[in-house]
Amino acid sequence: MTITMRPYQRAAIDALYDYFAANTGNPLVVIPTAGGKSVVIAGFIREAITAYADTRILMVTHQRELIQQNFMALLRAWPEAPAGIYSAGLSRRDIGAQVLFAGIQSIHRHALRVQRCDLVLIDEAHLLGRSDSGMYRAFLKELNEINAGQLKVVGFTATPYRLDSGLLHEGKDRLFTDIAYEVAVLEMMQQGYLCQVVPKQTETQLDVGGVGTRGGEFIAKDLEAAVDRDEVTAAAVAEIVEHGAGRGSWLVFCSGVAHAHHVRDAIRAHDISCETVTGDTPAPERDRILAAFKAGRLRCVTNANVLTTGFDAPGTDLVALLRPTKSVGLYVQMVGRGTRLAEGKDDCLVLDFAGNTARHGPIDTVDGRKKEKSEEPGDAPIKVCPECQTINHAAVRHCVECDYAFPPPEVDLAAKAASNALLSTQVASTWLDVTGVSYARHEKLGKPASLRVTYQCGVVRHSEWVCFEHTGYPREKAIQWWRRRAGNAALPASVDAALDATDDLPWPSAIQVRPAGQYTEIAAVRFG
């Protein structure tokens, strides 16, 4: 049986071959949520063993559902695959299998039992920034020593960044060294491989003023205390019910376990079937709830911190964000739960009550780089107790001196999100006349050179970078850029070759620019 792949899935595997032919590091493959990473993993495994029959591969992740999904994806593509599972949660310990799908919690102490291993694949690689990072690092270090330093590691993720330490392949303590392949979420939507996400501005907005931050994220207990308020929950749920009237599967992200149950109860009060899944939900009950949701027998599921990765319910056509987050990755993962294609599903409505779209911007332009702290210390948010005049931090609910109960912050139910564009194409763009074009070689340390194209639009300049010497998606974009201007003329193999040919390239008469975070991007060009 052959594996049918989409073009970008085939390109991802080819990019890994190209990477290992020229490099010795640990690469990442970045494919958006719902893009079919399991198909890429299955295809790569099968081809590796077909080419080198004694190759031993270990596929590691953190969640039993992901272990099962990836294992089954391989068997569907290759029924006779020499594969097994090592997971306490799945009650299997096939330690001798040539292709072993394992949970890091189960396998991390057993490198000596694994012994020979050529290749380790890590799914949801962005989670190495969490508490199990030490498990991965200790396990991989020991396994690499057992295999004389020849172990290769590949990470797969939709979000190649961590909350507190920037991009996965940057920084002195990085495990991954490069991105071997990346495909853009907007490109996949435009080509019909992912479902469109549609925002609708909500009247209700959660107030996180005064909620503290620790490790780059809102402090969990303070966040839940701030947003888990009956009047806010009632207002938000009323909007979910109104906007979800014509939609069949609602997934709601909440700010804590109690909050998830309170939102569930408020939805049930509208005579809508709803259940809750949290980290405390027993496995059999969780399986029952999610099976009913996927089958369409259950209209809504609320959850707290458990359905952000590895959860596959293609029919989800409404996602409600009642979980404010400073994590770009968590934001993208939550929205991504609605991007899977399903029969009868035209798009997925996203209701962001948490201000995440305003906080981070469109999911196709988010920047996961670590933000540098300001050298100028800001004033700590405070409030003064009216009873004893003690100065308190703004997040506290009771005075630290006399236990006075501060009134809850006022909630403006009419507040609007500052921005609710989920995709850059939903952001208003502007056409500008082009008065000149210049080209230059652009160098970036540790990366292939690119062609910097600068468009003069009156007194304003806008630039884009064309990556002829890169691989994967950047190279594909460079080809499209060249064909638009040069037709069937020979494609430059290098930036220098492109520079030699720029005199013959036509100038666009106008460019369309739109905001992209702190900068602008060129969305389209017009010739003639």
Image: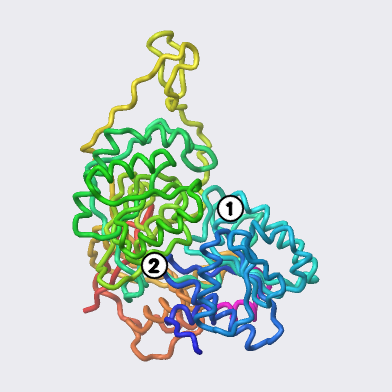
**Residue 303 located left or right of residue 97:** left
* 20 magenta-colored: yes
Identify residue type, mark 1: Gly
* 420 magenta-colored: no
Q: Which mark is residue 185?
A: 2
241 relative to 413, above or below: below
Magenta-tinted stretch: 15-26
Q: Identify the main secondary structure in magenta.
A: helix
90 or 124, which is in the foreground?
A: 90
Badge 2 element: helix
508 or 39, which is in the foreground?
A: 39
Q: Name the residue under label 1.
A: 129
Q: Position of residue 30 (x, y in %)?
A: 50, 68
- Residue 72 visible (yes or no): yes
123 relative to 358, above or below: below
79 relative to 29, above or below: below
Identify residue type, mark 2: Val
Crowdedness near tag 1: few (<14), some (14–19) or many (≥20) residues, C-alpha within 10 Å? some
Q: Which of marks 2 and 1 is nearer the N terminus?
A: 1
Badge 1 element: helix
